[in-house]
Every structure is written in structure tokens, then in C-alpha cells.
Amino acid sequence: MLDRLPIGIKVFIAPAIIIALMLCVMLVSELAVRRQQAAFLQVVGGSLTTSTTTTRLLLAVADVQSEILRYLQLRQRLAAGETVLVDLSRSVISKYQLVDRLFLTVKSTSGAAESDAISNITDFLTIHRAVSLKIVDGAPVTNMTTSTLMAHYQQLQSYIVELATRSLESAQNSETETEKFIKNFSYYLLGGLIVIMAVSIFLTIYVGRAISKPITNMISVMSSIAVGNFAVSIPGMQRRDEIGAMARAVGVFATVSKQLRDREQSLVEARALAEGASRHKSQFLANMSHELRTPMNAILGYTELILDNIYGELADKMRAVLVRIQINGKHLLGLINDVLDLSKIEAGQLTLSAAEYSIKDVVHNVYGAVEPLARAKGLALTVQMPAKLPTAQGDERRITQVLLNLVGNAIKFTDKGDVAITVSSSELSFTVAIRDTGPGIALADQLKIFEEFQQADSSTTKKKGGTGLGLAISKRIIEMHGGQLRVDSEPGAGSTFYFTIPIKVGAELS
């Protein structure tokens, strides 16, 4: 049955039923709470209020009776119109007003069972008030009057006590009924919760197995396919739900995977051949670069000797030609050195010699080497660094090579403005920044200029020449020191290259 339902529906079957059952429990609980609330309000606002107010009414009537008796005693000794008698008469009237208010509350909160007691209290309270008010108005007082007043007070008191007793009994009966209802409801609710938990567990297990078992089987099949067992049987191909669709997709996946494995085997063999060819290429470039650099150094050396007139005076025309040979030879030697460094890096033969060095000396040496180039282009070359910098440990020659490449690039690509070298240090590292006012580098080009044989794609950059190896080699050298090389630039706003290296690196680096 569940095999035909989509997983999206099966996933919601158990939670939906559980939620519906829980909503039923919440509804029943709400009804029980409302029932308890109504019973509570009935007790507090009805019987309990009646009982409490009746007690206060009893005290108020007793207080009135006490005032009347005191008035009678004083009236026998004092003349009419005395201040004490006048005050007592006013007090009696005000206390009757309190009695009336309390009795009105009692009548509004009492039930039908107390109607006869309310009627009796009304009658005797009316008679008691009439007799008392006649007394305070100055009517003659006889023994009959006093006896009547006392008799009605005692009867009124008994009816009020009866009303209080009935109200208290009514409150207790309501409390007992509510307690019994809540107790029974708690048992029913507990039983319902147990049934809901049992149904929920059953539904969860049943629906969960209906979903998880075929998925587990499919995972097992896919694991077998992943390890190369393409002959495994795929269950559930005929199902109409997502599992069936997955099974059919796994069948296609198995077929494609087998084809891919066969192709991958061919690619692995081809890759092994390519890697071998690449190693031979790198070794060849390293050897050839070395063989090219040796005669080129000899050519430059002899050119230098001839220009120094070691072999006799030169004609001006010949000197100009030799100067061109020297310039182009140095340029060619730089290209050969870049190719040699790159080939060593690819062949894993480039090593760094760690020793103590001064970053200030590195910066000053690079400044002395490139300052004539900046001056020849009319650029201001400045250096900013702290007066005291810690002694560093690393490959000074390679760090100098990196800085020389970055400052040389800044001068080469900047036609006007300035180039600034800034050095800062933290507790563990140096940061060297080379800022220029050149054309800037687009974001797309910033992502590729550190790759081999890549340059920024602009007409201005192309005119400057170069192999596109300097930044790639510099980045590898900085990373071999455990540092980072990055750039911050916008077209038309110049560029700033940063490299950060640890102050102290290992004694042996490779």
C-alpha cells in the first residue's frame, strides 16, 4: 500500500496523525480547564463570596445591635439632644447602610437553595431596622420594645448563620464535584496520552521502515557499485514511488559508472604518461636553462670587458652596439633565470637556505638597484619602515628576488606619479607593501596574474613585455617561506602588492 505513495506524503503521515491526536488532547484539556475555571468562579464568585459576605453581615448586624443597646442605656441617663446620643443615632443609621450593602451582595451571589433564608433575613432585618430607627428617633422605650428588638436580633442572627452554613456547604460540594471530575479526567487524559504514544511509536516505526529500508538497500547497492561491483541486483525497479525512480536512476548510474571506470582507467594510463613527460620536460628545461645561462653570462662578461676598454679603445658606433647587446643580454638572462626557477619549482628542486638576515638591508639593496630606473622615468621612489626591526631568518636572496620583482614591476607599469615601499612588523611576521600609481588591475585579471605565463589583459600591460613568470615565482617563494602574496587594485587607481612572511622560519626549507 505504502509503496504506491510518494515519499513526500509518507513522511507526513505519522506526524500528521500524531499532531491531530495531540490537538484532540489539547482540545479536551482546554475543555477541562474551562470546566475547572467555571467551577472555581462559581465557588469564589458565588458560594464562597456569599459565605464570606454573610459572615461580614453577621458582624455588621451585631455591631448595629451593640450600638442600639448602648443608645438605650445612655438614653436612660442623659437628656435628649445630648451630643453622645446624636452621634450614636447617626452611627446606627450609617451602620444600617453598611448592612444594606452587604445584604445586597449576599442576595446577588446566593443561589436558589438559599432563597428561603434570604426571605427570612429580609423580613426580620426590616422589623429590626424599623424598631431601631423608632428608638433613635425618640419614640418611648418600653420593656416590650427592648424584648422585641432582642428577639428579632436573635432570630435574625440565626437566619444569617444558617445562610452562611448553607453557602459554605454549597462551596464545599462544588469543590468536591470539581475535584472528582478533574481526578477522573486526569486518569482519562493519562490513558489517552499512553494510547497516543503507543500509536505514535507504531506509526513512526512503520512509516520509518517503509521509507528507510528501501533507502538503506539502495545505499548498499550504490556502495557496491562505488567499489566496482556492477553486477549487483538493484531492488525496487518496479515501484511507483520515488524509490522506484531512484532504483531506475541507480541502474543508469551503474551503467554510466562502468563506462566511466573503463574511461578512467584509460585516463589514468594517459595521465601517467603525461606526468612522466612533464617531469622530463621540467628536467629538460632545468638543464637547458642552466646550459643557456652559462654562455650568456660569458657573453655579458666579455661585453663588459670590451666596454671597459680592456681590449683597446672603442669607436663610438661600436660602443653603442655593444651597449645594446649588453642590455638585451641582461634581459635575456633574466628570462632564462625565470625559466630556470620555474623549472626547478615544477621539478621540486628549488630549495631555500634559511639564515639570519636584515629586512632593512634587503629593502635598501633593492632601492639602490631600482632607484636609477625610477629616476629615469621621473617617478618618486620612497621607503617607509620603522627605525628598529627584528633580525629575521629566511632565504635573503630569494626574498630580495621577490621584492626586486615587485618593485621592478611597479616601476615598469607606472608612467607618472610615485612608487612607495612600506615595511611593518608584528610580533611574528613582516608585511611589505609596494604601492604604485599605475593603471591598476581589473578584478578578473587579479585572479590570474599569479599564474604561470599570465599577465593583466590590457593594452598598456602588453606594451611592457615580460614572460608572466615573475609573480608566479614570487608567489611560490613567499609560500615556501610560510607567507602570503596578494594584491589590492582598481583600474585607474593604482595597485598595491603585499607579502607577509614569518620573522623566524625553519632552518631548512624545501
Image (tube, rainbow, N blue to C red):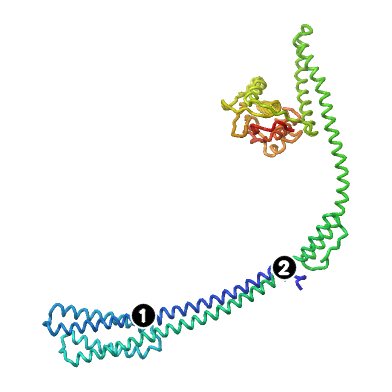
* Extreme residue in the bottom direction: 144
Label 2 vs 1, first from the N-terminus = 1
The quarter of the rendered structure image containing the N terminus is bottom right
Disc 1 residue type (three-letter):
Thr
Disc 2 residue type (three-letter):
Gly
* Most foreground residue, 56 or 285: 56
**216 lies above or below 53:** above
Q: Quadrant of residue 434?
A: top right
Residue 87 in the image: x percent, y percent?
A: 18, 78
Residue 131 as seen in the image, left or right of residue 166 = left
Residue 195 as seen in the image, left or right of residue 1 = left
Q: Quadrant of residue 282?
A: top right
Q: Quadrant of residue 212?
A: bottom right
Mark 2–mark 1 CB contact (< 8 Å): no
Mark 2 surroundings within 10 Å by alpha-carbon count, few (fewer than 14), some (14 through 19), many (20 or more): some
**14 lies above or below 252:** below
Residue 150 as seen in the image, left or right of residue 395 = left
* Most foreground residue, 182 or 81: 182
Q: Secondary structure at mark 2?
A: helix
**Mark 1 = which residue?**
52
Report the residue at 87% width, 57% height from top: 230
Mark 1 surroundings within 10 Å by alpha-carbon count, few (fewer than 14), some (14 through 19), many (20 or more): some
**351 lies above or below 73:** above
* Most foreground residue, 187 or 471: 187
**Mark 2 = which residue?**
208
